[in-house]
Structures are given as C-alpha cells and as structure tokens.
Image (spheres, rainbow, N blue to C red):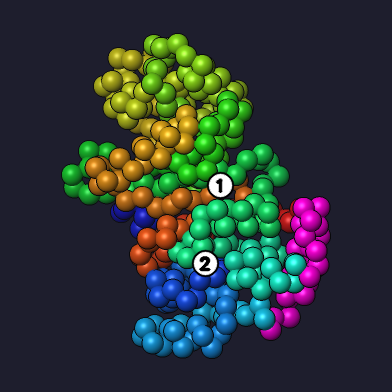
Amino acid sequence: MKALHRIIDKACADPRKIVLCEGGDARVLHAASRASREGCAKITIVGERKQIRAFASENGIALVDVELANPADSEHTETFAQELFVLRKAKGMTLEQAREKVLDPLCYANLMVRNGHADGLVAGAVYTTADVVRNAIQIIGVQPSSTLVSSFFLMMLCEPFHTLKGGMIFSDCALVVDPNAEELVVIAMAAADSARDLLMEEPRVAMLSFSTSGSAHHASVDKVVAASERVKELCPHLAIDGDVQLDAAIVAEIAQRKVKGSMVKGRANVLIFPNLDAGNIGYKLAERIGGAVAIGPLLQGLRKPANDLSRGCSADDIFNVIAVTVVQAQRTSFPAP
C-alpha cells in the first residue's frame, strides 16, 4: 500500500476536527467536501455562510456535514478577541484592533484551534505562507518540549520508475534559513517524530552534508557533526548518521564503503538538510526531476497542528494535507499556554 494511502486510512480510523478558512476558493471546498464524505475529518469552514453556500452551489459542490462558522455572528468572537488582546498587547495591539483582527478567518481559525474548537488547521491556498506561519506561532504557540517551529515535506516515491520506494521526510525545506547546531537538533528530533506518525515506521535519520564521516573540514560540517552527536546523546536508540553525503544516506552499497558503523546503512527515510538553500533545492529536485510527490510544507513543533499549502495547490493536495493534519492531531495535544 502506498504511504499516502496509509495516512488517509489512519485519518479515517480516527477523524479529528479540522478548520479551513478559505471558503471562497473552489479547491478548498472540493477538498472539504471530499474529506467529509470519505470520513477522514470533521470539517469546519470559517467565513460568511451565505457566500460560502452560494459559491459551493455555483461550483456544484455539496457541503454535506460541513460546519460553517462566521466570526461576524459567532458567540465566541468577543471571547476570542479578548484572548487575542492578551496575547498581543505587549506587541502594541489594542482591544479594538483585536476585535477587528479576529474577524479575519485565518485569525479566527487559529483561535478555534487554540481553544479546542478544532484539532488542527489547514490554510495557504489564498493566504501567504508568512501569514499562515505567523498566525500559527503567535496564536497556537510552540510545543512545551520544543524551542522551534520548523517545516518538512512529505515526499512520496511510489511510481514504478522510483528505485527508492515509499515515503520520506525532508526537513527543513521552508522555514529556518540557516539553523545552528542546536536548531538542527530540534529539527532532526521533530522530523523523526513526524516519520513515526506519518510514515508509520521507525525513523532512520541522515544529517546531510557535503562531507561523509569527516571527509571534509569546514564550519558548516562541524555544525552538522555537533548536531548529530547531540541527537545521539538525547535519543540513543534512534538510527542516525551524520555528517553524511546524500548518496551514502540512501544507497546501501555506498554507505557500507563510506560510513563505518552506520546505523542507517544507506536506508534513510528522514533527510535533514544543513540549511534552507540545500533543503529547498533538494525537495524541488526530487519533485521536478525525480518525479516525487511533495506534500507540504508541513509544520512541526506547534502545540496543535497547523499546515500551510502552496497557492498553486490542487484540491487533491488540500485533501492530502487535511489527512496529514488529522494524523498529526491524533498525537499532538498540549494545553494552551
């Protein structure tokens, strides 16, 4: 079974409440309708009800068992505004500004997640990545055990021409530009958890570099080595190699020659990139030349899941991210700070 199918099946086995906030986009409504129809999520769409229903009707989309929440007349709006004011007053936000801001569907949706009215959020078909990530960090907040919100792509290699088969985690490919050693540690540990949740197998982590086992000397290599050693200290049972070049991470014969005592043995399913340049280039090469399906960027390190979409996404892409968000929500549950 394809890795993506396993994720969808896992979501359907224990569906959670997912909130969407771009009801004026037909792709979002198609994905919402499908998620509700197939039973992988309980969907709420934030926005003006009449407009959403009219738009859905115009596009032949049946919103069966999909809840619509309008901040303009919700019983929660004033409470949410008061809470937003408390959260942001140190940054200069007034109560009146909070009351205005909470009418924005993205802000309202994040407050729904924060207060337990939804288990996760998906946005970004219309909103920018900066808007999605900023609202999630400011309102939902960071996990108590983490110091950093990072991202990953779920890379699916399921075509007959793929020599590697199944799913992989690529991190960080979208958020943290130049992580230091401590930040690489947090990214690697979060990505390992993401692999357990979404790939449903034990993570095998490769800390990527242009060096393998000290074959080159440079400050950027030192950073990767230091991060790898720290992860090994914190997670002694985790299979992790680093510093390691990509070929030694994913080709068993090369790993056998180049990585003495390898724990991963050339079978990495989690690739940790040393910086955003490498990560962004790497996932796009895998997608555009290698024919992998890239799902993301997905966020890790939040108290409750919120995930971004590409503004060029399809309805199928949105459905897949909804399923991923449900699976994340099945594990992630921390009280609001």
**Residue at image coords 73%, 55%:** 335
Which quadrant is the N terminus positioned in?
bottom left
Q: Which residues are magenta?
A: 73-96
| Residue located at (57% from left, 78% from top) | 47
Q: Residue at x 69, y 68 (%)?
A: 101
The quarter holding residue 45 reads: bottom right
Viewer-nearest residue: 197 or 212 = 212
Looking at the image, residue 199 lies above or below residue 247: below
Q: Position of residue 87 (x, y in %)?
A: 77, 57
Query: Please, is residue 78 above or below residue 293 in the view?
Result: below
How far is mark 2 from mark 1, CA to CA?
20 Å
Please state the horizontal and vertical placement of residue 125, each as a whole percent of the image: 45, 64
| SS at circle 2 | loop
Q: Which mark is residue 300?
A: 1
Q: Which SS does the magenta portion mostly show?
A: helix
From the viewer's side, name the closer residue of 131 and 119.
Answer: 131
Q: Picture coordinates of residue 24 (x, y %)?
A: 47, 76
As for residue 77 lying within the magenta part, the answer is yes
The quadrant where residue 39 appears:
bottom left
Residue under numbered circle 2 = 15
Dot in front, 2 or 1? 1
Specify whether 281 is left or right of 184. Answer: left
Label 1: state its secondary structure.
strand
Judge from the rendering whether residue 99 lies leftward or rightward of residue 189; answer left or right: right
